Image (cartoon, coloured by chain):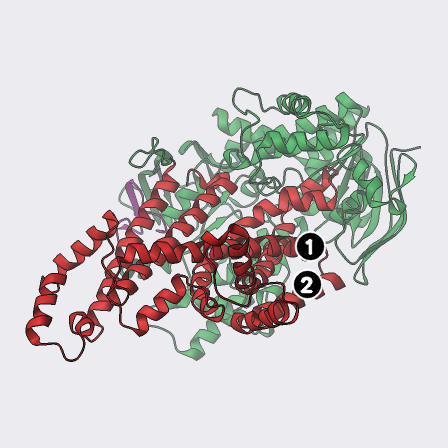
Chain colours: A red, B green
């Protein structure tokens, strides 16, 4: 492994540690005693104390942090008191909805954005470029929940092609489950695709001004060949950077979209956990999301080294 | 019928006329020089032939290649010609290659496109042409990336790409302007040999008359988009019948009238303006593992010299010889690894920024690229007054303004320029601005890093005159960092020749340049193109 990647890996681990401290500390300073919350207003002081002891809340801060982190590393996320099941089990169930949803929308936004960006860059200044960029401007401006409602109205209510919400579970078969994810994935992907298409276009236009594009043209390569073989790969670095940054917005977007489509995903789980003060669930899910974002950005860093040989030894 | 015939070519870009009635022809095996100052339309003529003009360009007239009118050719037909029958080499080798593709891919790509050869066949041919241009397989396998090569090596790759399919015409647009003189001589030799081997026509575009005089059979002189004079190179440049030709020739060999700084024996007790003793600078080696680095590079190695007030010296050497690193250390912009630098007897290494402040006002700098060294959003008044913060006590606003006006007058600009921004000036005026900025603190030493190499010859001679007069008027000492010996010859008293971090030869400028002793100095001198020598040789050859 090259120094570049080792350095990135190191930075990722340190970021994860810092994030865990921040998440832990935030929930420590939030008012309210989790033990009292669980037992309700009418509980006796003895019962609260007993529960505090059982939950380890009387231990010093540092010990609680270490046991929390230790639990994370061994897969023991604690127990949700509103659902009365292990958090790990809850998270696993909900991830089965959210993870495919995020991946499908990431895939959709990439396969929409890059061709649109390429097309607009190739036709720079022409009417087709203006139309493509106008459409993407609209895509950036439209809030995704409103767009979701529009999709529901058209495809579920009017055309009756796809379900308006809910999730049958993967047990009901792959196709019915996928069908339930199509509209939410589109609603999530489109605004992202709009931003990404604009980034792709401007990155390509920057690259097209480079001297090596002229060298490639002087070799006799047609304009489109140069665009694909020489410009695109050089333009991918800013595109991947934005893709990595967008992933965290995608996760945040799932909270809204899962509520609109009534999907039992991580987004809805964390939303409900916050309203019900189920702090253990909140902590765990937030940590999981942070870890996912860090891993995705590490992958983005890896992709830089694949794209650009100059970064392999940097 | 000539290989390339350009007749009454007119070119407009967005309505602005660029070329007017340009006529030019090249025969098989002929080397033709296209000479002119920046903006004269040299590159646009080349791009018209390639049909790679920017958007909004409209060309009329005739451009015939092998009888075929290129202005009427379809994009498809042009793609067949480019890279196969017509190759092109560009000025900036550092950016002319795609950074994410190997040199093998980039050379083989054109071969595959034009010949439909398989990948192994194309790579085989790419290997042969890279060997031919001086990049042997042992040191330069096809799997090298451009960033692993130096500027001269990259230019060889670009030449390999352009000549891989034995084109009948090669267009080289300032192919050596970004290279040092030794590399320049090597690349020009290569181009000449390739022309002779394959009976290839070459259009050599350059602003450097000496290079063109040395290389070409015929010459076309362009000014403001129009052909001024055309004909046999030796005849045109020796007779100089056209006034513009004469003007160019005079400017490119211009030596300012200046009194040489006398050669005096200084007493050991006297303090020099600048004294550098055993200066060394190492750069950390490249990381090769998490805790491992390759051996450090020694950029400057045990350099010692003294500079006296009013003395003008040149620090000459090839690219990468350590001359810029040495200058950065003298300016206290880069800490030395060991050794000492004394300015007027005061040690400046290891000093804090606050302690350096009173010294900095006496040392100013002028950079090569006058455009890149100005913030485009600041006006002249702010840009030129910038170093004034070094003065203690600080000046009032009236005094500041007076100083700026005086500095502008000194470099030949006027107070009406105060509110202008850098883009409103020409290249030569911008270099005047950076000299004004350097003068404003009334320094004792100015370090100038290739101050005229980005300028046209006529502007260049004016700037050299300006520097010579400042040197005389204020007894201002200069250190010129350059690979161009003609600059050293024109305005310096003494010269230090650097090679691989060391000063390998030092002495009076004329004696070192006339009679170099060390091998690096001899190489530099023999590689430097000289207009008069080149014309004399051409005339001799023609009898």
Vertical placement of residue B188 versus A51, above or below: above
- Residue B74: % across, % down: 86, 45
From where the camera sits, is residue B468 visible?
Answer: no
Q: Is residue B463 above or below residue B387?
A: above
Per the image, label 1 sits on a secondary structure element best described as: helix
Count of marks placed on residues: 2
Residue B397: quarter of image: bottom left
What subunit carries mark 2?
Answer: A
Residue B485 part of the magenta segment:
no
Q: Nearer the viewer, residue B479 or B431?
A: B431
Q: Chain of mark 1?
A: A
- Residue beneath label 1, please? A119
Earlier-in-chain disc, 1 versus 2: 1
* Label 1 – label 2 distance at C-alpha: 8 Å
The residue carrying mark 2 is A132
Image: magenta residue range:
B331-351
**Horizontal side of residue B56 vs A156, given as left or right:** right
Give how far across and how far down residue B44 sits, in percent.
Answer: 76, 49
Tell whether B417 sits left or right of B30: left
Label 1: few (<14), some (14–19) or many (≥20) C-alpha neighbours in 10 Å: some
- Residue A8 horizontal/vertical position (percent): 36, 46
Of residues B69 and B250, the one nearer the viewer is B69
SS type, badge 2 = helix
Q: Main secondary structure of the magenta part?
A: loop
Rendered residue at 36%/69% (across/down) = A271
Near-viewer residue (B303 or A175): A175
Q: Are marks 1 and 2 in contact (CB under 8 Å)?
A: yes
Vertical arrangement, residue A28 with respect to residue A116, above or below: below
């Amino acid at each position: 492994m090259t120094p570049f990647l080792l350095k990135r890996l190191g930075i990722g681990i340190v970021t994860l540690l810092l994030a865990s401290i921040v998440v832990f500390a935030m929930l420590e300073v939030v008012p309210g005693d989790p033990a009292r919350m669980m037992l309700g207003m009418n509980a006796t002081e003895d019962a609260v104390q007993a529960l505090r002891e059982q939950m380890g809340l009387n231990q010093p801060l540092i010990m609680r942090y270490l046991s929390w982190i230790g639990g994370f590393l061994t897969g023991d996320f604690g127990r949700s008191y509103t659902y009365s099941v292990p958090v790990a089990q809850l998270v696993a169930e909900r991830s089965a909805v959210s993870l495919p949803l995020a991946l499908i929308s990431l895939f959709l936004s990439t396969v929409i954005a890059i061709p649109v960006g390429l097309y607009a860059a190739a036709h720079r200044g022409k009417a087709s470029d203006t139309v493509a960029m106008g459409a993407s401007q609209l895509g950036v401006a439209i809030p995704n929940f409103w767009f979701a409602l529009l999709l529901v109205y058209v495809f579920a209510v009017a055309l009756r092609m796809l379900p308006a919400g809910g999730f049958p579970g993967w047990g009901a078969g792959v196709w019915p489950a996928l069908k339930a994810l199509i509209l939410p994935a589109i609603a999530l992907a489109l605004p992202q695709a709009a931003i990404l298409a604009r980034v792709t276009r401007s990155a390509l236009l920057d690259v097209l001004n480079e001297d090596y594009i002229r060298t490639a043209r002087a070799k006799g390569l047609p304009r489109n060949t140069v665009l694909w073989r020489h410009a695109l790969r050089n333009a991918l670095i800013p595109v991947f950077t934005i893709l990595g940054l967008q992933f965290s917005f995608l996760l945040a977007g799932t909270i809204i979209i899962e509520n609109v489509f009534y999907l039992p995903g991580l987004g809805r789980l964390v939303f409900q956990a916050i309203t019900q003060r189920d702090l253990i669930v909140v902590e765990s899910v937030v940590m999981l999301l942070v870890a996912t974002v860090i891993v995705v950005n590490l992958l983005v860093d890896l992709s830089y080294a694949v794209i650009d040989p100059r970064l392999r030894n940097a | 019928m000539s290989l390339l015939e350009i007749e009454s070519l007119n070119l407009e870009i967005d309505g602005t006329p660029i070329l007017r009635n340009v006529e030019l022809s090249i025969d098989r095996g002929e080397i033709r020089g296209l000479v002119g100052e920046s903006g004269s339309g040299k590159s646009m003529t080349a791009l018209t032939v390639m049909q790679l003009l920017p958007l909004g360009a409209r060309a009329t007239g005739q451009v015939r290649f092998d009888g075929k009118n290129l202005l009427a050719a379809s994009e498809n037909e042009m793609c067949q010609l480019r890279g196969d029958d017509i190759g092109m080499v560009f000025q900036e080798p550092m950016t002319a290659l795609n950074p994410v593709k190997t040199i093998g891919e980039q050379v083989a790509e054109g071969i595959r496109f034009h010949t439909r050869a398989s990948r192994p066949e194309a790579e085989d041919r790419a290997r042969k042409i890279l060997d031919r241009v001086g990049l042997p397989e042992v040191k330069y396998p096809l799997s090298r990336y451009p960033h692993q090569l130096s500027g001269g090596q990259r230019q060889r790759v670009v030449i390999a790409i352009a000549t891989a399919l034995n084109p009948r015409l090669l267009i080289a647009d300032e192919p050596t302007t970004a290279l040092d003189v030794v590399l320049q001589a090597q690349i020009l030799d290569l181009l000449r040999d390739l022309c002779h081997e394959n009976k290839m026509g070459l259009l050599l575009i350059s602003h450097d008359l000496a290079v063109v005089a040395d290389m070409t059979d015929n010459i076309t002189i362009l000014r403001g988009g129009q052909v001024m004079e055309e004909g046999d190179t030796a005849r045109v440049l020796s007779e100089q019948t056209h006034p513009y030709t004469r003007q160019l020739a005079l400017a490119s060999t211009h030596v300012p009238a200046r009194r040489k700084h006398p050669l005096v024996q200084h007493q050991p007790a006297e303090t020099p303006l600048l004294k550098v003793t055993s200066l060394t600078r190492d750069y950390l080696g490249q990381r090769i593992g998490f805790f491992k680095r390759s051996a450090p590079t020694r950029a400057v190695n045990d350099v010692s010299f003294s500079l006296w007030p009013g003395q003008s010296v040149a620090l000459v050497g090839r690219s990468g010889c350590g001359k810029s690193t040495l200058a950065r250390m003298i300016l206290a912009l880069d800490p030395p690894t060991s050794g000492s630098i004394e300015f007027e007897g005061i040690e400046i290494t290891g000093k804090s920024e606050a302690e350096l402040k009173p010294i900095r006002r006496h040392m100013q700098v002028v950079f090569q690229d006058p455009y890149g060294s100005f913030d485009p959003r600041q006006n002249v008044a702010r840009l030129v007054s910038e170093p004034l913060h070094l003065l203690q006590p600080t000046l009032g606003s009236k005094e500041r303004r007076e100083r700026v006006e005086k500095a502008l007058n000194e470099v030949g600009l006027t107070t009406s320029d105060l509110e202008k921004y850098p883009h409103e000036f020409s290249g030569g005026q911008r270099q005047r601005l950076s000299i004004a900025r350097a003068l404003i603190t009334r320094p004792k030493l100015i370090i100038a890093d290739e101050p005229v190499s980005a300028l046209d010859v006529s502007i260049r001679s004016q700037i050299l005159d300006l520097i010579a007069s400042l040197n005389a008027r204020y007894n201002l000492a200069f250190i010129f960092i350059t690979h161009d010996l003609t600059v050293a010859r024109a305005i310096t008293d003494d010269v230090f020749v650097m090679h691989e971090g060391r000063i390998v030869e030092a002495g009076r400028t004329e004696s070192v340049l006339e009679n170099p002793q060390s091998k690096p100095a001899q190489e530099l001198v023999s590689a430097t193109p000289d207009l008069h020598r080149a014309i004399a040789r051409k005339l001799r050859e023609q009898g």
